[in-house]
Image (spheres, grey):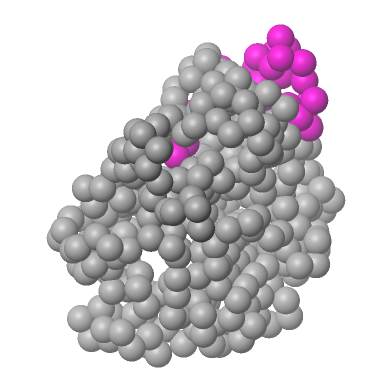
Amino acid sequence: MSDNKKNQKNKMVVWDFWQKMNYVESDKVANVIRAAVHEDVNWNGPHPINHLQGVDALITDFWQPLLKSFPDLKRKPDIFMGGLSGREEWVSGVGYLTGTFAQDWLGIPATGEKTNIHFGQFYVMREGKIAESYVILDLLAVMRQAGFQVLPPARGGEGGKVPGPRAGDGVLLTEQDELESRKSLELVEAMSKGLRRYVRSRDGENMRSMEQEHYWHPQMHWYGPSGIGRCLSLEEFEDFHQRPWLHGFGDRNLSETGSGRRMGSIGEGNYVSGGIWDTVFSKHHGEYIGVPATGKMMAIRDFDWWKREGDYLIENWVPIDMIDLFMQMGVDLFDRLRRQVEQRKLGKYWFDPSG
């Protein structure tokens, strides 16, 4: 089977799985999952769920609690794509899980209202089934929709839904032009090499060594996780995300030591996706979002979906497991949530409800 046909087959397996999960009756959920997922699946999710091994654990410890809390949950991807990276077959997507928040979930109080859960997901496919899964859910946004704020207001834009591609062309169900796919992948690889030219001890807050203006459109849109927010130009990206990030962390090339799991970097048409999971990336050198430097070596769960337009990158979606990142810095954001929940029971709010 050709690589393109194999990729199309893998995407259809995942797409069919997602569509069936949107409409399956509750007593048939396990059957749908087992049909698409390998019996010994290696599943990895956001803190505090983290790692599950095997389809039984996936059903009982993730899907059943999630669907109990959001019984009418529906998935709508904004980007859906796949491809081969080395010998591994990948399918990835980013978008929203939306449902009525009927029962508490992960200690987040239910609201009884429609709630949007931003997701980013990578699958490794083997023999036509999902063998590995890596998913980041923006749980901080779920907390915020429930009325709880556990981080200071983001520098970038925050609140509402993260937009999908402005052109509405991110769901790639058909084969894409191989030349365009290669152009997209080569542009992202060149941009990434530029990032690695930064040297903290030499450059400090001067980011010119990275020459990112060669790769990004000046009016690029960058969509980060809760706590960082969205940036609607290259200038905003540098001011609201890149400079604070380099101040807090800023090491480069440490991820090449082989720690963690690297998502397959795949290009399909005008889109590219990639990421890292539990991969060492920097020491915690300076204050970041209110947390003083700890000097600890940090690992990260970080995904990217890029959109190329002509010779420039125009859009970028970046889920990050911020709760896991803060846990490594000694800050338990779920503990902050628990304390706010207790205060709420006493009639005390982190804001003045009277306005």
Answer with left or right where residue 243 lies relative to residue 199.
right
Q: How many marks?
A: 0
Q: Is residue 206 above or below residue 165?
A: below
User: Which of 268 and 160 lies nearest the eye of the viewer?
Assistant: 160
Residue located 49% across and 20% down the image? 61
Residue located 25% across and 78% down the image? 200
Residue 87 can be seen in this image? no
Residue located 80% across and 67% down the image? 167
Magenta stretch contains residue 4? no
Residue 228 can be seen in this image? yes
Q: Is residue 240 above or below residue 91?
A: below
> Where residue 4 sits: x, y (%)?
76, 49
Magenta stretch contains residue 26? yes
User: Which of 336 and 130 lies nearest the eye of the viewer?
Assistant: 336
Q: Is residue 308 above or below residue 217?
A: above
Q: Outermost residue, front direction?
A: 354
Say which quarter of the image contains residue 242: bottom left
Q: Is residue 324 above or below residue 55?
A: below
Q: Outermost residue, right direction?
A: 174
> Where residue 289 sits: x, y (%)?
32, 63
- The segment highlighted magenta reads 18-46
Q: Quadrant of the N terminus?
A: top right
Answer with left or right where residue 192 lies relative to residue 35.
left
> Where residue 39 sits: x, y (%)?
56, 17
Q: Outermost residue, top direction?
A: 27
User: Which of 39 and 296 lies nearest the eye of the viewer?
Assistant: 296
Residue located 45% across and 70% down the image? 155
Say which quarter of the image contains residue 11: top right
